[in-house]
Each structure stands twice: as C-alpha cells, then as structure tokens.
Amino acid sequence: MWKRALLGAGLGGAIRLKYPRVTAGDYLWRTSFMADNSGDHAWDRVPIDAQSADAPLSSSAIFLVVTVPDSPQAVVTVRNTLGAIDDLVKNVAFRDLDARLSCVVGIGSDFWDRLKLPKKPKELKPFTAIKGAAHDAPSTPGDLLFHIRAERYDFCFEFERILLDTLGDAVNLVDEVTGFRYFDARDLLGFVDGTANPVGPDLKKSAQVSREDDPDFAGGAYIVVQKYIHNLATWKKQSTEAQEAIIGRTKIDNVEIDDDAKRQKSHKSLATITDDAGVEHDILRDNMPFGSAGAGEYGTYFIGYSGKLWVTEKMLERMFIGAPEGLYDRLLDFSEAKTGTTFFAPCRGVLEEISEG
C-alpha cells in the first residue's frame, strides 16, 4: 500500500501523494534503511542478524552504555556474552518477527586494548572532547554500547533484561536511554530528523568500513553517541522562521533552506562534510527522541554510524568550534551535550572471533 501511495519523493523537497497521506518523515522512516535491502535480507522470515547497522529504523530503541570492571572473570563473561548475542536476539525475536528486534554491539577503544586482540581498527580511539567558545562536547566513559531496536518496546525491554542478566556483575551501568519514534520521525524540537541519511548503495558505502580502508575490519562501523538535553521552554520562544534558520529546513514540509551566501551557517550546513577534493561524506544517523514530561527532561540521543571516524569528528568540530571558527551551530544554544563516547561495531564474523579470544 505504501509503495502504491508514493508517486515520487525527494528527501530534500516536496512529496507528491495519493491517499493515504504520507509525510516526508513517514517516507524517510520507511525507506532510509530498507532501500535496496530486499535482495540482501530475509527479515520477513528470520530474525535480523546481530551487528546489522542497516536494520530498519524502529519505533523504539534502548541505548545501553556500560563499563567492564578490571577483572579477568568479567572479561571472560563479556567475551562469552558477545559470542551469544546473535542467539539472544533470535530467542526474543522469534516471538514476533514483525517486531524486527535487532542489536548492534560497539566496543570502546580502552576495552578493545584490554581484550588483547592482535589487531585494532585503524581509527578507533576514545572520544575527543571538544571545547568551543560557547559550548563543549564532553568525553564520557564507555566500554560497550548495545544499540537495541524494535517496533515494540516490550521486545527491547525483554532483550535488555536477558542481556543484563547474562552479563551480571561483569558490567557497570553508565547510561541507559529509552528512545521512541515521535510522530513522522521528528525530534522534540519539532523538525524531521535524519533526512540526510544515505540510502541504497550509498548506505553501506557511508556506514561501513571498506576493504580498501581497513581490510581486517571491513563491514564494521565506527559509532559515536551523544546525549543532548533540550531547553524546550527557550526554544519555543523562538519564531518558526528563527527555528528554521537555525536548523536549515522548513518545519512543516522539511524543505532544505539554502544558506550558501550566509556567513552564519545552519545546523544542516555545518553537519555536511566534504573533503579537500570536494567529495561529500555522509554518516548514518539513527537518532531518537527521549524524555520525561514529569521530570521536565527532553532530549535527543545522537548515534552516528560511519565507515570513516574522521567524518563524524569533523562534523562535531564544525558544530562546536564553528566554520569559520566562532560561528558555531546555534542549535547548541538550546541543546546541551551531556555525554560523548566512541565505539567500533565489528561485523558479526569478527565479533564471533573476539568472543573466542
């Protein structure tokens, strides 16, 4: 039905529709991960493989960051659990394949060294804190990241429960965030989030390490996570036009706003990365809103997958330092970064090798 409803769409422009009505965010949510996957995956018949960074965007997610105590037994328990991740996913996912449960495990630089593995991803290192003139991006601890996604929150919950039971006291909780899909893939600031995600063949090219760049870890991905807390009260005092100038897109229909001639760049422009040859490099975002109305907490959990860590690092540098320096991302005046951690998610085969020691 959805394919029949779409006559044509451009992620940076208007979408022409037949009923049922589909918004720009709906189209993005349903296609950004699924494009060109029909021949690669059989997710309608079997659970999604562990370490599938290109799993479909989901309605629910849990972002779990833990550290591993300095104990040989803790390391053994973690190794054994990493080797069992695929089976743990299947044990829960088979209860309802339409829930599309998936899990990606990321390993931090320091813990990678503690595993005493013969090789290490070329760019893997701890998150580098950024100190800007007005705003900072802190570096916070994290040995392991579990990015858990599903169409049903109870599946995320059940998987996390079993996972933590299996790990026991081999890990210490650092951060746990429950994300949800907000209307048509919007953030709590009211804008569609993730429009610039690569699709089709560009998805793997952007989100996975290539064999040319690092043959030992081809198919893996660098992951950077940050938890942002929004000052919604102040944000809501801004006019729609002011908000759109900060984001770089129109609020209602998600159309890109050209700011090439302006010295102060929008969030959209500062997050667009080109190399010295003028080639644009993308990352794969799976950001999710989170919050508690009762506690007055509203935020966005940023998670970016990339085959080249420097691309994400350059994006954050432009946001916090500015381009040119001093003209930082004005979105940061309303959104404060509370965490920052870097991980590497090896492909499933390499993860299995790591678990075997």
Image (spheres, rainbow, N blue to C red):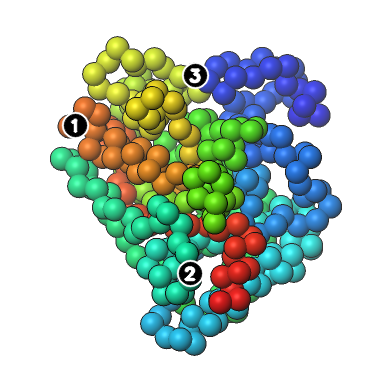
Looking at the picture, tell me which residue is in the foreground, 296 or 162: 162
CA distance separating discs 3 and 1: 27 Å
Q: Position of residue 82 (x, y in %)?
A: 59, 71
Residue type, numbered disc 3: Val
Assess disc 3: are there few (<14), some (14-19) or many (≥20) residues with their C-alpha within 10 Å of its C-alpha: some
Which of marks 1 and 2 precedes in the sequence?
2
Q: Residue at x 40, y 39 (%)?
A: 311
- Checking the image for residue 255, the label placed there is 3
Looking at the picture, tell me which residue is in the foreground, 201 or 161: 201
Query: Which residue of the protein is positioned furthest toward the top in this rendering?
Result: 261
Q: Residue at x 30, y 57 (%)?
A: 139
209 with respect to 151 (left or right): left
Q: Position of residue 16 (x, y in %)?
A: 66, 15
Assess disc 2: are there few (<14), some (14-19) or many (≥20) residues with their C-alpha within 10 Å of its C-alpha: few
> Looking at the rendering, which quadrant does residue 203 occupy?
top right
> Looking at the rendering, which quadrant does residue 56 occupy?
top right
- Checking the image for residue 325, the label placed there is 1
Task: Give the total of numbered labels.
Answer: 3
94 with respect to 284 (left or right): right
- Checking the image for residue 118, the label placed there is 2
CA distance separating discs 2 and 1: 40 Å
